[in-house]
Structure formats: C-alpha cells, structure tokens
Amino acid sequence: MAVVLSPKDVARLMAEPSPEMRAELAGKVAAGLSANGLTAGEVRLAQEIVGILARDVAETVRATLARALRHSPHLPREIARKLADDVEFVALPVLADSVVLTDEDLIEIVRRGSSLKQEAVASRAGLREAVADVLVRFGEEPAVVVLMANNSANIAEDTLHRAATRFAGSDNVKHAMVLRDKLPIAVAERMVTMVSKALQAHLVKAHDLAPATAANIVLASREQAIIRLSAGASDEDLRHMIAQMHRNGRLTPSLILRALCSGDIGFFEAALAVRNDIPVDNAQILIHDPSRRGLAAIYQRAGLPEGLFAAVRAAVDVVEETRFDGEDRDLERFRGRVISRVLTQVEAVDAADADYLLEKLGDVLVGAPADDRVPVAVG
C-alpha cells in the first residue's frame, strides 16, 4: 500500500516556497489519495492536505491537483466544487471526469460557467438527461455541439427537439445531431427537413432503415426522404412521427399520395387516422372495407383532393392484391405495379388534378428500374 505522505513531506509542503516543488508534492498527495487500499486515517490525512493545496496561490499547484484527482472517488465534494469553480486551466479536468460532482453541481456550473466549462460538462461519460437539458437550454453553441457528439450522453427526445429549434441556424449542431448513434424517429424526421442532402442520406441509412431500402433512395426532395425514413420505423414510432408532422403542418396531401404510390400502406393508414382524429385500427377497417365506402368517407373527411379519389382507390386495390415475391428488385416491381394501376385512372381525373398526380408519380418513379417504369404522359 502506498504511503500518502510522510511527516517530512508534510513539513516540506507547509514551508516550501517553490510552486514547482509544491506542485510535485501535490501530485504525490493526489496519487496517494487515488490509490486503492487506503486506511480511513490515510484518506482523512490526504483529504486535509488536498484541502490546503486547493487553496494554493499557484495555479500550477491547483491544476496538478485537479488533473491527478479527476477520477478519484475520495476527492471531497466541496473541494471538487472549489476546483470546478476555479479558472479553466484548473477546472476543466474535474468538470469532465470527477465522479463526486452531482447533477445539481453540474447544472449550476452550466448555468453560470464559461463556454469551455460547459463543453467539459457536455463531454462527460454517461451524462444524465437533466444536465443535457440544461446544456441545451443555457449552453453556448460549442457546448451543444460537444453534447450532441457525445454518444454516451442521455438526451431526452424533448431535449433533442429543443436543440433543433434553438440551433436551427447552426450547421454544426445539426451535423452533430444527425451523426448521433441513435435518434428517435420523430427527431430524425424533423432533421430531414433541416439538413443537406448528404446528411439526409446519413439519416436515412443510419436510423432504422434496412440497407436494401436505403440503397434505393434518391433524396430528391424532403418528401422522398421522409417516406424512406418511415419504412424502417415501428408502428408506434411511425404514428408518433406522423402525428408530429400533422401538428406542424407537414402532413400534406402530396406526401400522403407519394407514400401510397410507393406501396407504403402503413404510412397511408396512419396519416388518414391522424387527419381524421381516429385510432389507426378504425382507419384500417374503413380503408379496407371491400365496398370502398369506408375509404371514400375517411378520404373525404381527411380533406384530401376529391378529384384524386379514383387514383387513390386504385392504389389501395393493388396494394391489397399484390404480394412481395421475395425476388431481386421486389420493391421496385411492387411500386411499378401500384403506379401502373394508378395511371389507368388518369383519364378519369380532372386536368389540374391529373397534372398534380403525374408530377408526384414522376417523382416516385425516379427510383424504379427502367423496365418497370410507365410512360408518364396525358394522351
């Protein structure tokens, strides 16, 4: 077992005029206090001396102490707080790593600390949700970038939304958010509308989408990205995402039509449920009523374009009739069948609605194989 300090060391510490020598002794004390197997008496003696060193007039002494004790569970909390409140050169190691600082300590430091101190807190392993939320509310941009890049930090979904709102103009924050190992689907959906195409591609590939689906994505528009993003979501996450889009005015007829024409019946069902304010189970019963009277009723109540109902009905028919065959390019062929059937209804659609429909189908067809593409033209 290491001896913390000898009586001779203590005498030298009290009398030593050289900051360099006191820093050396501070390192020795800290190393002893961090050692395993100390007796209770040795811990108390070391802590008393650490308290003296923490008040040393020389920055180098306090900094040596802070660096050496940054991981020690024996560092008294009041001394850790004193070091954390010190100048940045002293405080940063303790703020980044000390296990004795509480969430309350960290929150107080974030609220009144410098940007560098906020960054140190944001970098802590296993940071808790309450501290992360205060960082997003009160932290400066660099600290929030560090927080978002810290994949061990626990960040609540509401906090992520708050960061997206507060730092909507910060490419650095948005970039760090997109690159997190895991984002809630509703946050990922929102980020699609806020970032570059390159980051959109990362969102789609990294957050719950099957690789085969992601490989087929051409992010030509925000709506296309959202459709593909939804394909990897659970039922609960999908409904949460669609409800959020509806609240924010982003659940447009264009998006719903594009989803249906891509064969995404789950998105279509959840969207109509949200726009009708009814449970998804009820919407599914109405949409798949064999007489299609239920579909007509829920479609009308959803406020979707009346002139496009025939095309939507055709799309629902083919989605119900068609099954994946499991062969290569299965998804593309399935999408092609849906679009082919929908296009048979174009002649029954008003000219303005037909133009609208064909524009949307043309966007969907971008990802289809050449032999499955249908000529998009009004005869």
Image (spheres, grey):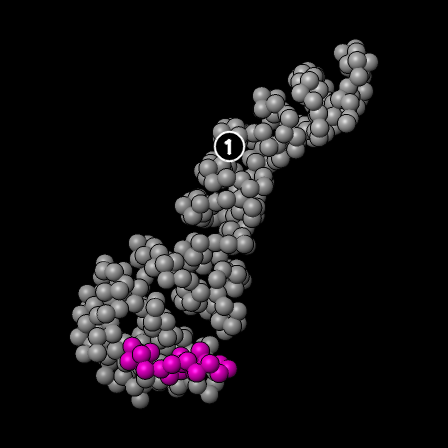
Residue 68 visible from this viewpoint: no
> Pointer 1: residues within 10 angstroms few (<14), some, or many (20+)?
some
Q: In the figure, 287 relative to 123: above or below? A: below
328 is within the stretch colored magenta: yes
Residue 332 percent coordinates (x, y)? 45, 80
Residue drawn at point x = 35 percent, y = 82 percent? 322
Residue 73 percent coordinates (x, y)? 63, 29
Residue drawn at point x = 78 percent, y = 26 percent? 2
Locate residue 323 relative to residue 80 in the image: left or right.
left
Residue 257 percent coordinates (x, y)? 32, 71
Location of the C terminus by quadrant is bottom left
Looking at the image, which is closer to me, 216 or 183? Answer: 183
Magenta stretch in the rendered image: 316-337
Locate residue 355 relative to residue 79 in the image: left or right.
left
105 is within the stretch colored magenta: no
Return the residue at label 1.
Answer: 103
